[in-house]
Amino acid sequence: MSKIKIVTDSSVQLSEQEIKDLEITVVPLTITIDGKSYVDGVELTRTEFVKMMHESAELPKTSQPAPGNFIEVFDRLSADGSQVLGIFLSHNLSGTVDTARQASAMCEHPELIKVLDSQLTDRDQAFQVLAAARMAKEGKSMEEIEDKLAQIKSSQKLYMMVVTLDNLIKGGRLGKLTGKIANFLNVRLHLTMQEGHIEIVKKGRGKKFTKSFDDEVLAEIEANKGHIKELGISYVDTPEVAEALKERILAIDPQIDIYVAETSPVIMTHAGSGAYAILFYTE
C-alpha cells in the first residue's frame, strides 16, 4: 500500500530512535576540513567534528548532497507508488533544498515528490519533520500534513547565543579588524532566525549579556506556559550550559518535552565555540 515517506538532511536535530521509529530518511551533507571530505554523520560524528574544527587552521566547509544522491533516494522511496515529502534546512544556509527540488524533477515519478524549505534548521527543522512523519504514519494526506507544517512554522522560535566571533571572522561574515576589536571587547551576539534569515537581535559584552539572554528567553517560555509542547536545546561544546538551561525550563513547566544535543556542523561552523540555541514552537 502506498503512503507518504519523509526525507530530510543531516543538519536536522533528530535522535537515532526517532529516525528509526518514524522511518525517516536522512540524506547527509558533506563536510570538508583541511582539504579532506567526510560524509556528515556517517564518516564523522558531531563530537569528532567539534574537535577537528578547533584544531583546524581554516574554517570547515559544508556542502549540500549531490543531485544524484537525492535522485537515488527519491526513486527508491517512490518505487512502490508512495509519495515522498522532503523537508530541508533553510535555503539561506545551504543550497540543499534547491538541489533537492532540481533532483525531484529528474526522478522517475516527479509527481510523487514534494520538497519544502523548513526556513530553519536543527531541532526547529526536526519539529516539522517529526510532525510530518507522525501524521504520515496516521495515514494523513499530503495536504493535511502541509497545513500542519504551515501552522508549526508560523510560531517557531530559534534563539542563539554566540560567545566568540572567531568563526564569523574566519568565514568573512565580519570584517577582520571589526571582528578582532569585538573579540577584544568580549562582544557576544544574540541571534534569531526569521523566515529563513539569521538576524542579530542584540550585541553585548561578557557573561552579564549571556545571563540577560537566558532570562529573556526563559521569560518568553514562562509567558507561553502550556502552549509549548516540544523544545530543543542545541550546543557546540558546552553540554553543561545546555543541561543547566534544561533544568531551569523544567522548573517553569515540567510538561515540556526537551531534547538536548550537539548541533550540526552547519551551525557549529558559523556559530563557533561556546554557542548554544533554544528552539521551540507554540500551539
Image: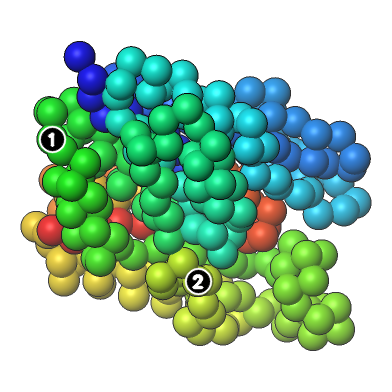
Can residue 241 be seen in the rendering of this structure? no
The answer to which image quadrant residue 218 occupies is bottom left
Residue at mark 1: 140
Residue 106: x %, y % from top left: 54, 37
Q: Is residue 156 left or right of residue 141?
A: right
Question: Hey, what amino acid is under mark 1?
Answer: Lys
Sequence-wise first label, 1 or 2:
1
Q: Residues within 10 Å of mark 1 (few under 14, many from 20)?
A: some
Query: Residue shown at 79%/85% (left/top)?
Result: 178
Q: Is residue 254 left or right of residue 11?
A: left
Residue 5: x %, y % from top left: 32, 28
Query: Residue shown at 19%/59% (left/top)?
Result: 151
Question: Hey, what amino acid is under mark 2?
Answer: His
Under circle 2, the secondary element is strand
Q: Nearer the viewer, residue 181 or 211?
A: 181
**Which of the numbered marks, if any, corresponds to residue 225?**
none
Residue 177: x %, y % from top left: 86, 84
Q: Quadrant of the N terminus?
A: top left
Residue at mark 2: 197
State how many labels appear.
2
What's the distance in space between the residues labelled 1 and 2, CA to CA? 31 Å
